Amino acid sequence: MFLSTSEHTADAKNRVSVPASYREALRDDPYDAIYVLPHFDGPYLECGGEQFVQQYRMDIANLPRYDPLRKDLEVAILGSIRRLDFDSTGRVTLPKEFITHAGIEGRCAFVGCDSHFQIWNAQTHADRLGNIRGRLAARLADPAEAERMGGGADLASLLRDSESLQALLKGEKL
Amino acid sequence: MFLSTSEHTADAKNRVSVPASYREALRDDPYDAIYVLPHFDGPYLECGGEQFVQQYRMDIANLPRYDPLRKDLEVAILGSIRRLDFDSTGRVTLPKEFITHAGIEGRCAFVGCDSHFQIWNAQTHADRLGNIRGRLAARLADPAEAERMGGGADLASLLRDSESLQALLKGEKL
DNA sequence: CATAAATTCCCATGCTATCCCATAGAGCAT
DNA sequence: ATGCTCTATGGGATAGCATGGGAATTTATG
């Protein structure tokens, strides 16, 4: 599980340290590496471990083999993802195209999103975070919208009724 | 598993280096080679290892023996695929018809698509990638359209329920 | 069978990415 | 307060990769 945000600096060789807590989350992966995708949705890199790639593989493999959407996704996702191996101190070197895509120079922000994480130019991310907080605050004003943000099951009440769920939570290191 | 895109140059003898990471993915194949198909879908070469050919053989073998579609596919696919052997440094030489079909001169792009990869004229591919990213980004704006891109099973929740699937992910080097 | 053409094999080279060591600072424990 | 450990970062050495060119072997053709 990837949580929290931290900033690191890319050096002259385009190397950046991946946060230690993220590396810990990847400990059981077959490769000592992360998979990185320069996302078509914006100037950032979407990253994760084995589960991250497999999710994309699965999504795409479920489409018919000659579906034009599938062909697009193959190129824009599978064709763009790269595996970046850690060096002995836990850094990866970002290829030039990735640096360019995300507009990275110097400081960059690592943003945890549970199943994956993002890498942004630190300044770009800071600006973006301000906007996002504003949007969400505005959304709270509309009850219907607000409900979508947390309208599902309440974990606390589920836990009261289920011993097996309690056991799961205690044992689980994500 | 073939991932990522990289550019290489075809020399005067029409030789190109196959990316080292792709060769690694083919390590267990019986031949030190790739299978290459000038695809009827466009000016590119579709390539892969043993699994790549077997998939096509199976697709076609599943059609009725006298089905006109089958006859067409036999010619356009099985009849067009060629096996190209690596030289000692990991290059293959592209036959003239393949060069012509894909419009290759000098730089060409290798695009990983999981089970197979494509070879394009570098410039043609760059233009195409721009278009694809635009299309997909636009698609994200429409929730109904976006759902097709990842509307299936959520790998994370599948993993929670299946120990064997967890084990598979840990062990697998693809 | 002979010649030309094309292809395969082998070696050489420059670049780039990877590895290894060294340093500094933060946090924790004694 | 002092020393230890872990994390982040910097720089130099090295091995692997991509690419070029020539020689040898095979294939097509008359």
Image (cartoon, coloured by chain):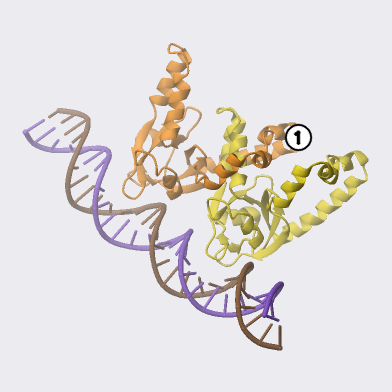
Chain colours: A yellow, B orange, C purple, D brown
B22 vs A30, left or right, is left
Q: Position of residue B153 (x, y in %)?
A: 67, 35
Q: Position of residue A150 (x, y in %)?
A: 85, 43
Q: Does residue B73 sit above or below A61 in this rendering?
A: above
Residue lying at the far top in this picture: please name it.
B66
Amino acid at the residue labelled 1: Pro
What is the quadrant of residue B139 in the picture?
A: top right
Q: Position of residue A99 (x, y in %)?
A: 60, 57
Q: Nearer the viewer, residue A129 or C20?
A: C20
Q: Position of residue A111 (x, y in %)?
A: 71, 56
Residue under the point 53% across and 62% down: A87
Q: Nearer the viewer, residue B31 or B82?
A: B31
- Residue identified by numbered label 1: B143
Is residue B77 something one can see in this rendering?
Answer: yes
Q: Residues within 10 Å of mark 1 (few under 14, many from 20)?
A: few
Q: What kind of element bears circle 1? A: helix
Is residue B101 something one can see in this rendering?
Answer: no
